[in-house]
Image (spheres, coloured by chain):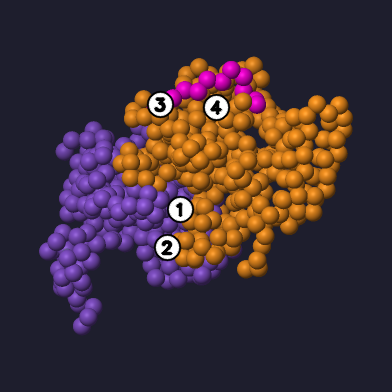
Amino acid sequence: MEQLWARCNNCRRILYKQDIMDNMHVCPTCHFHFRLSAVERFFMLFDVGQFELFDEDISPVDVLQFKDQKKYSDRIKISQTKTGLNDAVLSAIGMMDGIRVIICAMEFAFMGGSMGSVVGEKVTRALERALKEKVPVIVISSSGGARMQEGILSLMQLMKTSQAIARLEKAGVPYISLCTDPTTGGTTASYAMLGDINIAEPDALIGFAGPRVIEQTIKQKLPKGFQRSEFLLEHGMLDDIVDRKKLRPYIIRVLRLFTNQPR
Amino acid sequence: MEKEKDFYKLEKNVIEIKQKIDDLQESEDPLKEDKIARLRTKIEKEWAGIAPELTPFHFVQIARHPQRPYTLDYIDALFEGFIELHGDRRAGDDPALIAGFGFYKGKTTAVIGHQKGRSTRNRLMRNFGQPNPEGYRKALRIMKLAEKFGFPVVTLIDTPGAYPGIQAEERGQAEAIANNLKEISLLRVPVVNIVIGEGGSGGALAVGVGDAILMLQYSFYSVISPEGCAAILWKDQGAVKQAAENLKFLAKDLKGFGIIDEIIPEPPGGAHVDYETMFKNLDKSLQKTLSRLKNKTVEEMLNERYEKFRQIGIYEEK
Ligand SMILES: [Zn+2]
């Protein structure tokens, strides 16, 4: 019985699960955008049945033999079992309204979507494939930032991915960054802020430092709506905020414009 | 974890001897050269007993030592006729990140570096070396200026991290860092990075990537501070030393991962005990690195820079 119902994180209403799902995981009452898995993103954006995954077999390694309250190697296993994925990003190539496009979608459920060697490598390979095949690329971020358990290797993924974007830019291959809740830390300080177009879903947390860290540093309460999509739009960091239901048509329009393919 | 001694306690004897050296240097003593040399040997002996016992957190304490030479000290010692240039031409100037031009070995060179303050007032003015977006944008402006005139770029890294503040977020801290990374990868002049103290996360990285990364022996370069890591993963500040150990952020670790090119040795006791030797050691490595880079064509250099970061990362592939 209980699987049929879900409570909205925002308005706290009890809702029929199927209604949320039919509504692209957006609350029918208050418009709250629930988090989506990477695979759900692909089904939502690509033409029906028109995509294939690539670079699927890259898995994380506990290089530092990192152990906090749990071993990193155990955290990896738990996340892999929970999500069915090897790490926190999936790459796919396919069609959107007949236009060939590469999409990387981050998986927040895998260790908070944190970026370690695998995420950095997969995003870089996707960007390099986009460069080689001259195919537009979209990265959908949902990440708490760099993965601490891989130490400096994680930090260097910021540079690895950003320099690949520099090459795309020089070659004139369009790159769209979609920030979803949450996009913070090293992910924001690299590919998430480097799109030719930076867009976000409504009310997503987007920032460099986490709100708690800022609060502790400045010792005052943060203003309402701080680091939310609307705040970033107001401060000139985003091109637009796009409702989930309008995302596919919006991105198709951008792709048509930037590849000069009117209907 | 076992109780470990604070570094500031460990170095007590070394500092006492150093004080004597400083006093002698000020004095008119005709035998002072000899006496100083003897005291230096004494420091070496003391240090030989301390150095093997140093833990990663001790390295952190050395890297953050309030007497450690800062960016401006290196500029004074090694760059002639330095002029500091201010402002990002967008919103403001950032005293936490210094940028300008000077002559290094007779050649115009851009120098960019985090600056921590020494007195309380100075520290506040420098925001403890934690840049705002203006700092990163100013740094990039100076790098582009260097590119325009064909001058090499040297960066000195010493920051706890990018400043976590309201205005910093409003003005795009993340965008400023990301944009620097992207632009540095295309810069058509040599870029040498030297971690002189704290290499704190994205705030260090934004001016901490290039053709060659060098690290001082007791510096560190990390994805997060040990305090931040302890707070997030252990939810316990008692775990700071454990975090410092686990993060593997010392120069020798990064050398092992192939991320940095060279470890610059520090004098016995650490850089703060003997500025002159520290300047000499850094000078030697910097000169060698710049002349190595000078012999490359721009295309060669850019490809090697790309490959350097392209290779970083350890994973398994079936
Ligand atoms: Zn709701």
In the rendered structure, the colour chosen for chain A is purple
Total marks drawn?
A: 4
Q: Which residues are magenta?
A: B77-88
Considering every residue shown, the one lying at the far front of the view is: B28
- Where does residue B91 sit, x and y in percent of width and height? 33, 30
Cα separation, mark 2 vs mark 3, equals: 39 Å
User: Where is residue B143 shown, x and y percent of the image?
Assistant: 48, 26
Please tell me if label 4 and label 3 are on a single chain.
yes
Q: Which three-letter amino acid code belongs to the residue tagged 1?
A: Ala
Residue visible at 50% across and 17% down in the picture? B149
Q: Which residue is mark 1?
A: A146
Colour for chain B in the figure: orange
Q: Which residue is mark 3?
A: B87
Q: Which residue is mark 4?
A: B111
User: Does dot 1 land on a helix, a strand or a loop?
Assistant: loop
- Residue B298 in sight in this render: no
Work out whether disc 2 and disc 3 sit on a shared chain: no
Residues flagged by tags 3 and 1 on a common chain: no
Q: Quadrant of residue B42?
A: top right
Which one is nearer the viewer's eye here, B214 or A114?
A: B214
Whether the residues at callouts 2 and 1 have beta carbons within 8 Å, the answer is: no
Q: Is residue B80 magenta?
A: yes
Above/below status of B101 relative to A72: above
Q: Residue furthest bottom?
A: A1
Calculate the distance from the C-alpha at mark 4 to the C-alpha at mark 1.
28 Å
